Amino acid sequence: MINTIKHEEYTLKGRRVILDTAELSPSNYETMLMTPGGYVEIASMSATTEADALRHFAEIRAALSLPRWTAEKVKQAAKEAGTGCFIWNCYGARQFVFGPDSRAQGNARSRNAKAMTAALRSMGYDAMDYCQMD
């Protein structure tokens, strides 16, 4: 029996998508980004623990597409903002995943993530933050 762990529906690049993390069997988790109805799979990642599956959920949700930016330009922007990023190639679409670099704990990390999300939204991006308790 498939057990949904986390589910979210949102708009990505002007189209509705579904992001879902599910336990397929013990120690077998899958996180998938797909179109409604599951007709087109955009991205998927497998994991052996629920914690890793939820991390994959956050990574996919935090991915940002900057089609005309070079990797060097994005990494420099992240560095200037005091954070890091990595490139995730998802079915031919290059995504940049950012994580607020905070040595702080609890609320300080949440405040940093919310500030980054607010800045991206103010620039017109469909952005959200994801916080998870350890």
Image: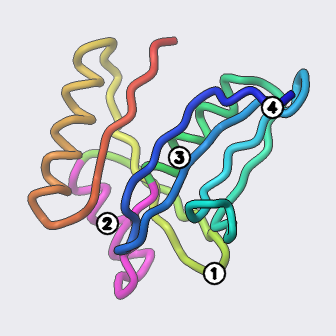
Q: Which region is colored magenta?
A: 63-81
Q: Which residue is mark 3?
A: 59
> Residue 29: x, y in percent?
79, 34
For residue 92, the mark is 1
> Residue 38: x, y in percent?
67, 61
> Residue 131: x, y in percent?
39, 26
Q: Quadrant of the N terminus?
A: top right
- Distance of label 1 from label 3 (alpha carbons): 17 Å
Q: Nearer the viewer, residue 18 or 111?
A: 18
For residue 76, the mark is 2
**Residue type, mark 1 in image:** Gly
Q: Which residue is found at the position 63% from the left and 60% from the top?
A: 37
Element at badge 1?
loop
Q: Earlier in the sequence, mark 3 or mark 2?
A: 3
Q: Which residue is found at the position 31% from the left and 66% from the top?
A: 76
Q: Earlier in the sequence, mark 1 or mark 3?
A: 3
Q: Which residue is mark 4?
A: 2
Left or right relative to 78: residue 20: right
- 13 to 104, vertically: above or below: below
Asked if disc 1 and disc 3 are in contact, CB closer than 8 Å, the reply is no
Left or right relative to 47: residue 84: left
- Distance of label 4 from label 3 (alpha carbons): 22 Å
- 108 to 41, vertically: above or below: above
Pair 3/2: label in front: 3
Pair 2/4: label in front: 4
- Distance of label 3 from label 2 (alpha carbons): 20 Å
> Residue 100: x, y in percent?
33, 39
**Residue type, mark 2 in image:** Gln
User: Label 3 crowding class (10 Å Cα cut-off): few <14, some 14-19, many 20+?
Assistant: some
Q: Which residue is found at the position 35% from the left and 82% from the top?
A: 69
Pair 2/1: label in front: 1
